[in-house]
Amino acid sequence: MKLTNLQLQNFIARIKLKRENMGTYRTQVTNLQEDLEKYITADTSTGIKVTRVIIGGSWKKGTILRATGENPIDIDLILYVEGEANLQDDLERLHDLIVDYLKKIYPNKDILRDVDAEGKTKSIKIKFIGTGLEVDIVPVVPMDKPADYVWQPQRGGGGGKYVTSVVKQLEFAGGYRKQNASYTSIVRALKWWRNYKELDQLSSFVIELIVSYLETTKGCEANIEEGIIRFFKFVSDPVFPTINFKNAINSLPAPIPKFYVADPTNNENNAAKKLNDINWDEIKKEANDAFEALNIAQSKNFEGDTTEEWKYVFGSSFNIKSED
């Protein structure tokens, strides 16, 4: 049997972060933001200042999941930093400055917990043990042109940078949310599937972009079940196409890598750069298994048999009964 949007919304309600639980996390992020701005302003050895702060990622896009043991609440804090000429040419220094400030703000935290082989922090991350919140701090340097674009350092602070627009990425996601009230539910469910199947190389951003691409090329899908099945069919197909979106600046690279999902604001950025043949084969296999299971679920005559197939895909937490 097919499941209704109402039934699947009951499942979504169980896996999303509850509104009443957001206040504690928001307070921690606000305190972190204020402390960082204070330290940056007080450091007279630089001319750097914070001119804007944006909370990004799934928190802002409305697709954040509740915390589990393996998957904490993760929030992106975007710091717009200006004040020195050619700051964008020394993003490694900016990265290291932020790390130093955090070590002063949180002397008891292991700021350098996540490091690469060269001793560089993979990301600027703060972990709050009490609530399980993890905050990724992303310093960016605004560009004069195009409007709303920034230089953003590559993870690891190795000096590399790329051009993107946090503002336009959020507008992009917001457009699909306005177009389709089921968009965030479809994305949330697929992120939960990714976590349950431990497909770590499939980022939340790539999931969002694939769903958006299907909305663009196949039409708006308001039926949550069909939207989920459409994703699994697409990902399990033998050939994975290059994905990009109109209104993004610059051209796609030549030659185009095998797995390419372009940043919707800049065609030069590949959101799927972590994917390779090995992990993509695993993702494709799990997607095919999910596609087959949910098609079998639709052929069942009883709710219990149907939900058993859904539990195979989403785990034992799958439940379509109201929490009330």
Image: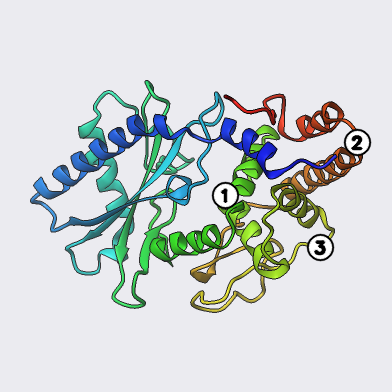
Q: Residue at the spot x=45%, y=38% of the render? A: 74
Q: Position of residue 307 (x, y in %)?
A: 79, 30
Label at residue 195: none
Q: Identify the element where label 1 is drawn.
A: helix
Image vertical order of residue 234 relative to residue 198, above or below: below
Q: Identify the element where label 2 is drawn.
A: loop
Q: Residue at the spot x=77%, y=57% of the render? A: 234
Labelled pair 3, 1 in contact (Cβ < 8 Å):
no
Q: Identify the element where label 3 is drawn.
A: loop
Mark 1 is on which residue type? Thr
Residue 94 lies left or right of residue 56; in this view the side is left
Label at residue 184: 1
- Decide if residue 271 is in sight here: yes
Q: Residues within 10 Å of mark 3 (few under 14, many from 20)?
A: few
| Spatial CA span between label 2 and label 3 | 30 Å
Q: Position of residue 166 (x, y in %)?
A: 40, 60
Residue 73 lies left or right of residue 301; in this view the side is left
Label at residue 300: 2
| Spatial CA span between label 1 and label 2 | 27 Å
Sequence order check: which comes first, mark 3 or mark 1? Answer: 1
Sequence order check: which comes first, mark 2 or mark 3? Answer: 3
Q: Locate the N terminus and report the quarter of the image it occupies.
A: top right
Q: Quadrant of residue 304?
A: top right
Image vertical order of residue 84 relative to residue 67, above or below: below
The residue under label 3 is 239
